[in-house]
Image (cartoon, grey):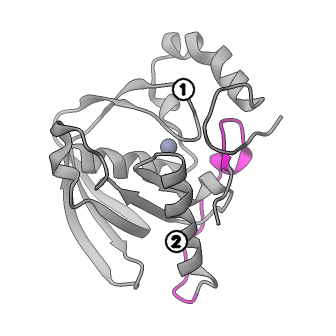
Amino acid sequence: MIYPVYVYGSPVLRKKAKEIVQDYEGLNQLIDDMFMTMYEADGIGFAAPQIGKSVRLIVIDGTRVEDEDNQTLKDFKKVIINPEILEEEGEEWLFNEGCLSIPNIREDISRKPRIRLQYFDEKFNFHDEYFDGIKARVIQHELDHLNGILFVDKIPAIKKKLINGKLNDISKGKTEVSYKIIHPK
Ligand code: ZN
């Protein structure tokens, strides 16, 4: 099932999501639905709160990104459950981020380039891995969603002022999108 995507202003995007237990009912279906919804909206990373489920689950698929520069994403398809970033290292770098919950806005966001991540996969196998570059970036962005943080929270106040009108419009559903959304107003 393809879900509508909750957009900016929706309270669920501001909640700290709950951990998933191993016998969580309907987990496989939820994972399939999240991939489907993400593909429908042309995303490469997606977090459960974006379909209104406040649980610590992320899906990622960078394998369909065709950009020459993004060759490193060809093997980047993952289900990430109950993730925790243990370390973030390196000199912060800017990358132009977007979000399916904040359509038609992109901003350069500064983050560290390398992370150590502990998480469970869809079979509840435990992983402890390092990621860098764009992979780290996608994980950092999606993990923020599980803590109620959005990328626009990370831009300077002056810039934020400039996009406040647009954000307000998004929260009223006044934005052009090719996928189904749910807005709070
Ligand atoms: Zn996002």
User: Residue 31 — which label?
Assistant: 2
In the image, the segment drawn in magenta is 5-23
Residue type at mark 1: give it: Asn
Q: Position of residue 127 (x, y in %)?
A: 27, 75
Q: Quadrant of residue 125?
A: bottom left
127 lies above or below 173? below
* Residue 16 visible from this viewpoint: no
| Secondary structure mainly formed by the magenta segment | loop
Q: As drawn, is 168 to the left or to the right of 119?
A: right
Quick check: is the Cβ at mark 2 less than 8 Å away from ligand 1?
no
Element under disc 2: helix
Indicate the quadrant containing the N terminus: top left, top right, bottom left or bottom right: bottom right
Mark 1 or mark 2, which has the lower sequence index?
2
| Number of residues whose C-alpha sits closer than 10 Å to that of mark 1, classed few (under 14), some (14–19) or many (20 or more) | some
Picture layout, residue 26 above or below residue 78: below
For the C terminus, the image quarter is: top right
| Residue 44 screen position, x and y as percent | 40, 50
Q: Which residue is mark 1?
A: 104
**77 with respect to 101 (left or right):** left
At x 52%, y 49%, the residue is: 145
Q: What is the total number of numbered labels drawn onto the structure image?
A: 2
Q: Circle 2: is it few (<14), some (14-19), or many (20+) Cα within 10 Å?
A: some
Amino acid type of the residue that numbered disc 2 sits on in the rendered structure? Ile
The reply to whether the magenta stretch includes residue 37 is no
Q: Taking 131 as reference, is 31 above or below it?
A: below
